[in-house]
Each structure stands twice: as structure tokens, then as C-alpha cells.
Image: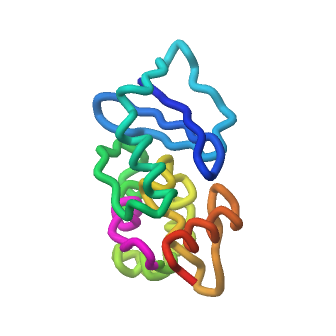
Amino acid sequence: MIYTRFDSPLGEILLCGDDDGLHRLVLAAEEAPDPAEADCDDAALFDAREQVLAYLAGRRRHFSLTLAPGGSEFQRQVWAALLRIPYGETRTYGDLARRLGREGAARAIGAASGANPLPLLIPCHRVVAADGLGGYSGGPALKRRLLTLEGVA
């Protein structure tokens, strides 16, 4: 496993990956990877860093990175559905449940979205509650900020 840490408009970000792809993106990264399990490799993760920074600067709408988030089969289905939400648009948890053929599973969709190990790259901030903003691992202010960046009122 390799990692890089870098400053962004959102604070420090930690990216972790390996030959299979990116496994984790941590916003406001306070935790440090275990040195026995990960080596710092800024050069290997340079392109991922630059794509994240370009997105946050409003110069990029899509990522062209290999993602390897792990997770259960259900979580991977939800995360794949999140990847299909276009930049600047939102869907409700209920919408995603219906699209996945799991009517009534909005809470499970929310839980899978909250377990997303690659926020920004897998855009869980684009999923909102039917009656408002909904949750976000980085908090509601950050979710609002990301949606505003994408032009969502």
C-alpha cells in the first residue's frame, strides 16, 4: 500500500492505494497510515492528487482514476450507482433504492453511502434526503460546499 498527503481547499487529504487502484481518500486527514503497511509515494499518486485538486478548483468534473474501494457486494452496487450521478445533479436515497431494484431500502443506501471510502471520487455528496440535505461523512457544511462547487442550489 502507498499513500500521499497533501493540502487542499478542504484541508489535508490522504490518498491510499496500490497496484489495484485507490482504496481510500480521507478528508481533513488526521490519521496517519501505519508505516508497516504503507509507504509514502507522492510521485506514484501525483495524477490522483492533481485530479482531486483540479476538481476542488472547479476545473474538473470527472475523474479518470482506477478505484478499488473494497466493500460488500451491496456497497459496491451503491457506489457504482453513485458514480452514475452526473456532476451538478443530485438523487435522493429513495431514488437510488428504486434504481437498484431495492424499493424501501433508502436507509441501507444511506449506510452504504456513508461507508464510502473514496468521498469526492465516488460522489456520495450528490445523494440527498427527500426532505433536505441528508448526511455526509465530512459533515453538512462540507456537503453543502461540494454541492455549491458543482452548481447545485
Give the image quarter of residue 100: bottom left
Q: Range of the magenta residues?
A: 78-89
Q: In this view, does 27 lie above or below 122?
A: above
Q: Which of 78 and 122 is in front in this view?
A: 122
Q: Is residue 131 above or below residue 42?
A: below
Q: x and y percent of residue 19 in the render?
A: 29, 29
Work out which residue is located at the far top of the displayed protein and give it.
Answer: 36
Residue 70 visible in the snapshot: no
Q: In which quarter of the image is the N terminus?
A: top left
Q: x and y percent of residue 144 in the render?
A: 64, 71
Q: Which of 81 and 86 is in front in this view?
A: 86
Q: In this view, does 133 lie above or below 59?
A: below
Q: x and y percent of residue 64 in the render?
A: 29, 51
Specify whether 125 is left or right of 137.
Answer: left
Image point (44%, 79%), residue name = 89
Give the image quarter of residue 7: top right
Q: How many callouts does the rendering have? A: 0
Q: Which of 110 and 152 is in front in this view?
A: 152
Q: x and y percent of residue 45 in the render?
A: 39, 33
Image point (41%, 61%), residue name = 59
Q: Is residue 83 magenta?
A: yes
Image point (48%, 21%), residue name = 40
Image point (52%, 13%), residue name = 36
